């Protein structure tokens, strides 16, 4: 999935949430093995949290994976974006 598709998807989720009066939106990352694309994973998380900051909303994401390729790069990304507290 390209960054442009990720951006459009998150924009859609965020705007629909706001239009419905909610301040929360969530992305589920799945299909094939999402950890094969760490750059796209990082972009999705970074952009999702930036939208949340911009609109004073709450963003969350989940990943469906068997974690067989949990590389050091993927671990760094997940640690960076795992909510603290």
Image: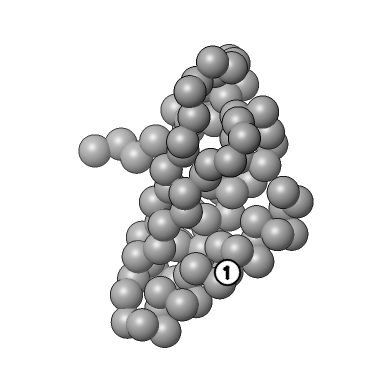
Looking at the image, the residue that sits furthest to the left is: 85
Residue 34 point in image, percent of width and height:
60, 35
Is 83 displayed left or right of 42 in the figure? left
| 5 on left or right of 44 | right
Check the image and tell me how it is coloured: one colour
- Residue sitting at x 62%, y 35%: 32
Q: Is residue 17 visible?
A: yes
Q: As displayed, is residue 76 above or below residue 17? A: above
Q: Quadrant of the C terminus?
A: top left
Dot 1 crowding, Cα within 10 Å, few <14, some 14–19, many 20+: some
Residue 52 lies, with reference to residue 69, above or below; the image says: below
Q: Is residue 81 visible?
A: no
User: Which residue in the structure is indicated by mark 1?
Assistant: 11
Q: Residue at x 59, y 17 (%)?
A: 69
Q: Looking at the picture, does residue 46 appear above or below residue 13? A: above
Residue at image location 46% in from the left, 77% down from the top: 16
Q: Residue at x 32, y 75 (%)?
A: 22
Q: Secondary structure at mark 1?
A: helix
């Amino acid at each position: 999935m390209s960054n442009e598709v990720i951006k459009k998807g998150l924009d859609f989720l965020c705007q629909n949430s706001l239009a419905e009066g909610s301040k929360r939106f969530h992305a589920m990352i799945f299909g094939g093995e999402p950890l094969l694309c760490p750059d796209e994973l990082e972009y999705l998380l970074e952009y999702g949290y930036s939208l949340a900051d911009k609109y004073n909303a709450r963003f969350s994401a989940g990943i469906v994976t068997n974690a067989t390729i949990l590389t050091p790069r993927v671990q760094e990304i997940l640690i960076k974006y795992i909510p603290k507290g």
